Image: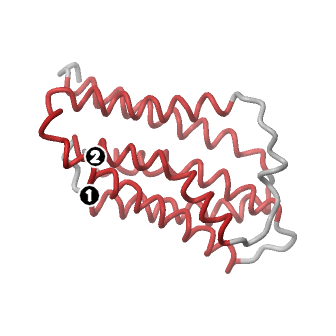
Amino acid sequence: MGGIELLFIAVGLSMDAFAVSLCKGLSMHKLNLRHAAVIALFFGGFQAVMPLLGWLLGTQFASYITKIDHWIAFGLLSLIGGKMIYEVFQKVEESRECTYSLNLKELLVLAVATSIDALAVGITFAFLQVSIAPAVSMIGVTTFTLSFIGVYIGHAAGTKLKSKAELLGGITLVAIGIRILLEHLEIL
C-alpha cells in the first residue's frame, strides 16, 4: 500500500473526529487555540493508537487468513465507509453533540468512539502487511491536523460541513476497499 493510499485512509478515518471538532469549534464562544490543540491531541492520539492495536491483533491471525485477506480488507473498509455514508443521511439530534466544554472525560469517550473504525483498519493493515509505523504516524498526524483545523472552521463556519466531511470520508474508505479487492483479483 502506497503513501497516497495511506493518506486517503488517514483522511477518511479522520472525518468523524473532524466532524466532532467542528461541533466543538461551533460551540466555543471565543476561539481558544490551547483547547483546540488538546482536542486535536486526543483525537490524533487515539486515531494513531487504535490501528496499532488492530495491527497487533491482526498479525496474530494473519497466517490463518492470507487466502481471503483481500476480501476481509474490502469488507471492513466497505462496512466502515458504508456506515459513515449511512449516518450522513440519518436524522440525528445534533444539538446535544455541539455543546462546548473542555471536559477530558468527555474527550476521552469521543476520541475512543471516533477511533473504533481505525481499530478495524489496523487489522486490515496486518493482513495487507502494511508497514505500521508510517501508517499510524500518518493517521495520527492527519487526524491531529484536521481536528485542529476543524475546531477553527467550526468556530468560523458552523456545522454546515459536518455531514459533507463524513460523506467524503465514507466514500473514500469504500473506494479504497474496492481498489484492494480489484487488485487482489488482478482486475486492476
Residue at 55%, 32% in the rendered image? 83
Where residue 97 appears, as percent x and y from the top left, is 77, 52
Question: Left or right: 182 with respect to 158?
Answer: left
Look at the numbered disc 1 and give the secondary structure of its residue: helix
Look at the numbered disc 2 and give the secondary structure of its residue: helix
Whether label 1 touches label 2, CB < 8 Å:
yes
| Pointer 1 local density, CA inside 10 Å: few below 14, some 14–19, many at least 20 | some
Residue at 71%, 65% in the rendered image? 152
Q: Is residue 46 above or below residue 10?
A: below
Q: How many marks?
A: 2
Q: Which one is earlier in the sequence, the residue at label 1 or at label 2?
A: 2
Where residue 51 appears, as percent x and y from the top left, is 37, 54
Instruction: Report the disc number at residue 7.
Output: none
Where residue 106 appears, as percent x and y from the top left, is 68, 64
Question: Left or right: 174 with respect to 93?
Answer: left
Where residue 77 appears, as percent x and y from the top left, is 40, 34
On-image quarter of the N terminus: top left
Residue at 56%, 68% in the rendered image? 42
On-image quarter of the C terminus: top left
Q: Quadrant of residue 141?
A: bottom left
| Pointer 2 local density, CA inside 10 Å: few below 14, some 14–19, many at least 20 | many
Residue at 78%, 69% in the rendered image? 101
Residue named by callout 2: 125
Q: Nearer the viewer, residue 79 or 64?
A: 64
Q: Amino acid at mark 1?
A: Ile
Residue named by callout 1: 132
Q: Amino acid at mark 2?
A: Phe
